[in-house]
Image (cartoon, rainbow, N blue to C red):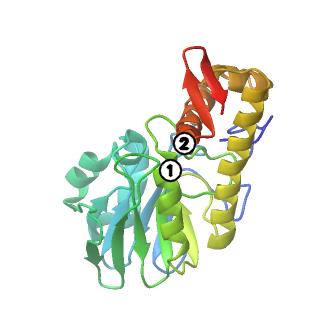
Amino acid sequence: MGKNNKTLRDEDEEQDLGPEPIVPGVARALSPLVRRILGLNPSPRTSYGTNTYLVGIDEIVVIDPGPENTSHLDSVVGCGGDRIRWVTTTCSDPAHAGGVNAMIDRTGAEWFDPKDGKEIIGTEFRLTAHEMGGPTTDHRTFLLEEERTLLCGQLISEEWAVPLVSGQADLSIALESISKASKMRLRRIAPVFGHVVEDPKAAISATLERYSATDDLIVKALKEGATSSEEVVASQYSKIDDPAQIDLLISNIEVHLEKLATEKTVKQLKSGWKVR
């Protein structure tokens, strides 16, 4: 979700802006135990593209292999080879999980079912799955215990260009999940879209700030006469003309409206949304 008059993703922006370069198809070591390969699926919804993470050295788990894209899967298999032992995802969305079966077929890896509290114990690491819903109904995260790194899927980002909730997301549940993450003594957060963040507290604060700013923007728009998510977007994001970005914004606003309705800040009448 973007701030007022900010696009979700500037198509002309160089992809190496930020704390570390993001280069499609190139494995980048983020720590002794974690490498990242960017998928070839940039869009307003996926930002630069899917971040596929390879965790481990002698034994590797691939997290979020991304869509079933031959070139991207070639890069992942070329990096991990026969050391890839497990494949798993932060949710079942095709942008995260479309390449799961192809990755398993190529490597003979085992599917890791990420039930809450379940662990992968590799040669050099222990990875614990945590159910942290909100962005999707089946959303989960993975805590790399040795480095206190949370591979957080779509849950947290400090970048306004990265959309977090849309579609069937439940923002109230997402906020509960973020609260859980804030208590994990994290050293780093690795999201599925966007840059790795080195200051988890700042990333969590930025995410909460984004949600709060969007809530305020919606209330302001409703007070000025908007009655639907489409009208909120038209009035508050008038400089955006990309249909895909507009559709994503509308979906995002709808998620916020549902949360605001639960909090009894707004209500939906036959004539549309109103501030209580």
Q: CA distance from mark 2 to mark 1?
A: 6 Å
- Are there few (<14), some (14-19), or many (20+) residues within 10 Å of tag 2? some
Q: Amino acid at mark 1?
A: Ser
Rendered residue at 36%/67% (across/down): 130
Rendered residue at 57%/58% (across/down): 156
**In this figure, which residue is indicated by the disc labeled 1?**
172
Q: Quadrant of residue 12?
A: top right
Q: Is residue 50 above or below residue 21?
A: above
Q: Is residue 264 above or below residue 237?
A: below
Is 93 left, or right, of 195 in this rendering? Answer: left
**In this figure, which residue is indicated by the disc labeled 2?**
259
Is 34 left, or right, of 200 in this rendering? Answer: left
Is residue 50 in view?
Answer: no
Q: Amino acid at mark 2?
A: Lys
The secondary element bearing badge 2 is classed as helix
Q: Quadrant of residue 95?
A: top left
Q: Is residue 90 above or below residue 165?
A: below
Which of marks 1 and 2 precedes in the sequence?
A: 1
The secondary element bearing badge 1 is classed as helix
